[in-house]
Image: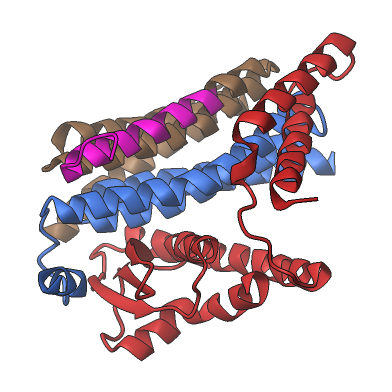
């Protein structure tokens, strides 16, 4: 059963990568950004379907670190460095937000 | 020069350098605003950087810190290939468990650096620290032993001696 | 020319590790294992991409911002992982069925 699911997932991933890197005709940065958007779909699946609150918290925390890499690639594609500012501030805010949510999950007040 | 003044001076120089690196260095107004902002920051929050000064040979500690840095980078590359193997494998061959280890480090900064390094190296994640008893609780994804000494040697033995040279 | 090749290779490797980390977030069985995979791989991948951006751009504003991003990621990501793991353990989220021992719970009973 697990093996069947693994083979199914492998087929889907191979289809996506072949379509992205060999069929789709675009700049190299556009292909990398497509990979990033595909991984953001996985993160959103974990946010929606996570069985507990901590799973959703992990997904949101990882999303903040993922977005800084994606925004730096977008900045390279447009040759413009203000995307990097957005990425840095996004990562900072998501770090503070995960600390605050973790404290709430733990059951303590915020000024502890 | 007291410790507090030294700490404020270090914070001033560091924040001015960061400001000049992040803005356009050519304009004189930007550079002056950077100096003013760095002065305000160092007056408000400068005294928290250095709290206790240790007499020590700076060059020797710097050498061990560099060795530690490259050792840590190599361990981190190994960690990533290990996790990639676990994720791609069809059966995900994991054997997790939470074990306790005992460290020889006593300082707060040293324990924090050790915990962060353990989190970023193969198969281990720090769950909690007990600073008084010097115990660390580690989630280990591929558990090899439950005894205290052996797991300490397996997990913290990679970094502990280098960190002892750097911090104490 | 050789600088651009090295930068692009670093960006490719970083993207691959980011994707593997997110795949681990979906495949592994419980919160702690997911945290392990996600924290390690995504931190290394994003740091690799920022390092590639620094090599491609050189010593200008964009490159220094990338260096600042690397330093911030390396300091922030393990702390967030540790805080989330402790909060999950204290709010009594069960470990995966194959878990062998839990010495943290034993020590918390004694206290």
Q: Is residue B36 left or right of residue B109?
A: right
Give the main secondary structure, helix, strand or loop, of the magenta stretch.
Answer: helix
Give the letter of the blue chain: C
Tell me the residue at 40%/61% (across/down). B83
- Image x and y of residue C41, in percent: 45, 52
Q: Is residue B33 left or right of residue B96?
A: right
Q: Is residue C36 left or right of residue C104?
A: right
- Image x and y of residue A43, in percent: 30, 35
- Image x and y of residue A9, in percent: 26, 46
Which segment did they paint magenta? Answer: A87-112
Out of C36 and B93, give the one closest to the viewer. Answer: C36
In which quadrant is the C terminus of chain A drawn? top left
Tell me the residue at 32%/49% (across/down). C83
Out of B137 and A66, give the one closest to the viewer. Answer: B137
Tell me the residue at 17%/31% (across/down). A48
Q: Quadrant of residue A38?
A: top left
Give the letter of the red chain: B
**Is residue C62 depicted above or below A11 in this figure?**
above
Colour used to depict chain A in the structure image: brown
Query: Does the magenta portion include A99?
Result: yes
Out of C43 and C107, give the one closest to the viewer. Answer: C107
- Image x and y of residue A22, in percent: 51, 33
């Amino acid at each position: 059963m697990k093996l069947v699911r693994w083979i199914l997932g492998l087929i889907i991933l191979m289809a996506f990568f072949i379509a992205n890197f060999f069929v789709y005709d675009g700049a190299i940065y556009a292909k990398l950004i497509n990979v990033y958007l595909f991984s953001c779909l996985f993160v959103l699946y974990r946010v929606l379907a996570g069985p507990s609150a901590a799973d959703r918290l992990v997904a949101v925390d990882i999303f903040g670190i993922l977005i800084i890499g994606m925004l730096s690639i977008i900045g390279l594609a447009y040759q413009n460095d203000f995307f990097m500012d957005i990425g840095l501030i996004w990562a900072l805010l998501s770090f503070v937000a995960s600390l605050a949510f973790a404290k709430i999950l733990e059951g303590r007040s915020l000024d502890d | 020069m007291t410790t507090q003044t030294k700490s404020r001076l270090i914070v001033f120089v560091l924040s001015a350098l960061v400001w000049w690196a992040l803005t356009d260095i050519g304009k004189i107004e930007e550079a002056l605003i950077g100096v003013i902002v760095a002065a305000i920051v160092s007056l408000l929050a400068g005294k928290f950087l250095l709290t206790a000064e240790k007499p020590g040979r700076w060059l020797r500690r710097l050498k061990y810190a560099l060795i530690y840095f490259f050792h840590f980078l190599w361990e981190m590359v190994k960690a990533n290939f290990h996790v990639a193997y676990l994720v791609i494998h069809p059966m995900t061959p994991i054997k997790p468990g939470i074990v306790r280890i005992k460290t020889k480090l006593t300082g707060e900064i040293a324990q924090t650096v050790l915990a962060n390094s353990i989190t970023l190296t193969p198969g281990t994640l720090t769950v909690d620290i007990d600073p008084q008893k010097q115990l660390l609780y580690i989630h280990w994804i591929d558990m090899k032993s439950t005894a205290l000494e052996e797991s300490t040697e397996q997990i913290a033995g990679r970094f502990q001696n280098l960190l002892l040279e750097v911090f104490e | 020319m050789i600088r651009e090749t090295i930068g692009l290779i670093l960006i490719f490797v970083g993207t691959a590790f980011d994707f593997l980390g997110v795949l681990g977030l979906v495949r592994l069985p419980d919160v702690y294992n997911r945290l392990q995979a996600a924290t390690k791989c995504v931190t290394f991948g994003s740091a690799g991409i920022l390092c590639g951006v620094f090599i491609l751009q050189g010593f200008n504003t964009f490159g220094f911002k990338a260096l600042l991003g690397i330093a911030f990621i390396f300091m922030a990501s393990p702390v967030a992982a540790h805080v989330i793991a402790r909060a999950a353990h204290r709010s009594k989220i069960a470990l995966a069925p194959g878990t062998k021992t839990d010495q943290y719970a034993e020590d918390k009973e004694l206290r």
